[in-house]
């Protein structure tokens, strides 16, 4: 089982791959996991946003989880996304992941409709009471209609002692409140804010961009760990410019996380996979993909240069 102290470093999302008929592409998924392990991240996770958990029925989710854990568990620390739209079926997924050997699970709040304030606390308590023997990472993002603050975590932690970390999709001032009021957890950020968050105690990042160039992100992370912020911050600012010029226009066109992440992987070219997403969400078009590649070549050529 994953401990709070072990929850640090570069944790990389694994894509759920589809074939041209919209079915799970197990062979490509296995190949991708094997190649990512060779790239030496500190951990892998699946069936979050990038893994299109919302597009998987129960049987498909079980199959993806089984393959993921068979390929990765015991070789590298692993987390399984157990997100669903009600408490009962979230618990069912958490139990399944625990029984199959996951080191920890990720859960988010049910997102279809807002809940009463007290229901968010009860959701986490119910998960813990049903499955008290696996560490929990809370997927804390605005998309779920409720962002937990540090004071919220401080209130709930005595009742959910297995809550060891969060994925903090928030602004830096919100992040500061988080670490001030809930220091007993490890709160991860994404790629763009890691150097600044690391100064506030952030132990790692959840990243899909690692899949473009592992060497670049190992170097970026190590510079922060070593205190070489004068080298890490310019890398961060270059990525911020790239994001603003290359990625933000695609977000404004309505492309969702997995569509973008799959475009990044295809653009980088070293991992197997394609841009296909499960409908109703559509992949990045050929025209928009060409735009992404062109601007990336101008601003972040490293994202096109990695070869294992």
Image (cartoon, rainbow, N blue to C red):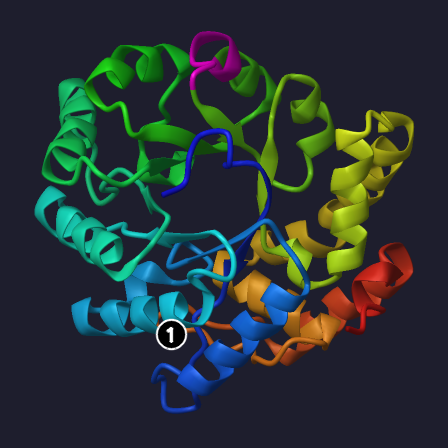
Q: Circle 1 sits in a helix, a strand or a loop, which is it?
A: loop
Quarter of the image holding residue 112? Answer: top left
Q: Residue at x 26, y 37 (%)?
A: 109
Q: In which quarter of the image is the N terminus?
A: top left
For the residue pair 95 and 306, the one nearer the viewer reads as 95
The question of residue 273 being in magenta is answered with: no
* Residue 254 in sight here: no
The percent position of residue 162, horizontal first and vertical second, equals: 29, 29
Horizontal side of 35 relative to 149 (left or right) equals right
The percent position of residue 154, horizontal first and vertical second, equals: 33, 11
Q: Mark 1 points at which residue?
A: 278
* Residue 2 in sight here: yes
Q: Is residue 78 above or below residue 283?
A: above
For the residue pair 297 and 131, the one nearer the viewer reads as 131
Horizontal side of 13 relative to 150 (left or right) equals right
Horizontal side of 8 relative to 93 (left or right) equals right
Q: Residue at x 65, y 67 (%)?
A: 38
For the residue pair 178 and 63, the one nearer the viewer reads as 63
The question of residue 179 being in magenta is answered with: yes
Query: How crowded is the residue under tag 1: few (<14 C-alpha within 10 Å), some, or many (20+)?
Result: many
The percent position of residue 11, horizontal first and vertical second, equals: 56, 48
What is the magenta range?
178-184
Q: Residue at x 18, y 33 (%)?
A: 128
């Amino acid at each position: 089982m994953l401990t709070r102290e072990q929850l640090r470093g570069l944790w990389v999302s694994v894509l759920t791959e589809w074939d041209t008929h919209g079915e799970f592409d197990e062979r490509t998924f296995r190949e991708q996991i094997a190649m990512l392990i060779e790239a030496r991240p500190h951990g892998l996770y699946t069936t979050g946003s990038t893994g299109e958990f919302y597009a998987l029925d129960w049987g498909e989710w079980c199959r993806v989880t089984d393959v993921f854990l068979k390929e990765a568990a015991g070789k590298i620390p692993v987390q399984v996304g157990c997100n669903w739209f009600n408490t009962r079926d979230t618990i069912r997924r958490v139990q399944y992941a625990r029984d199959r050997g996951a080191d920890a699970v990720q859960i988010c709040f049910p997102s279809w409709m807002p809940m009463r304030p007290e229901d968010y606390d009860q959701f986490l308590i119910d998960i813990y009471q049903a499955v008290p023997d696996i560490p929990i990472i809370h997927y804390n993002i605005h998309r779920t209609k409720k962002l937990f603050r540090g004071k919220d975590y401080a209130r709930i932690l005595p009742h959910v002692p297995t809550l060891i970390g969060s994925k903090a999709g928030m602004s830096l001032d919100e992040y500061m409140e988080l670490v001030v009021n809930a220091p007993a957890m490890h709160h991860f950020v994404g790629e763009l804010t890691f150097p600044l968050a690391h100064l506030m105690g952030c132990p790692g990042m959840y990243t899909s961009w690692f899949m473009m160039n592992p060497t670049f992100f190992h170097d970026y992370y190590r510079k922060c760990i070593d205190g070489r912020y004068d080298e890490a911050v310019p890398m961060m600012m270059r990525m911020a410019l790239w994001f603003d010029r290359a990625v933000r226009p695609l977000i404004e066109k309505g492309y969702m996380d997995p569509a973008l992440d799959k475009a990044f992987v295809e653009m980088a070219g070293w991992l197997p996979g394609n841009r296909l997403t499960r409908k109703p969400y559509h992949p990045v078009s050929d025209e928009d993909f060409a735009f992404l590649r062109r601007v990336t070549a101008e601003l972040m050529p490293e994202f096109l240069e990695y070869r294992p």
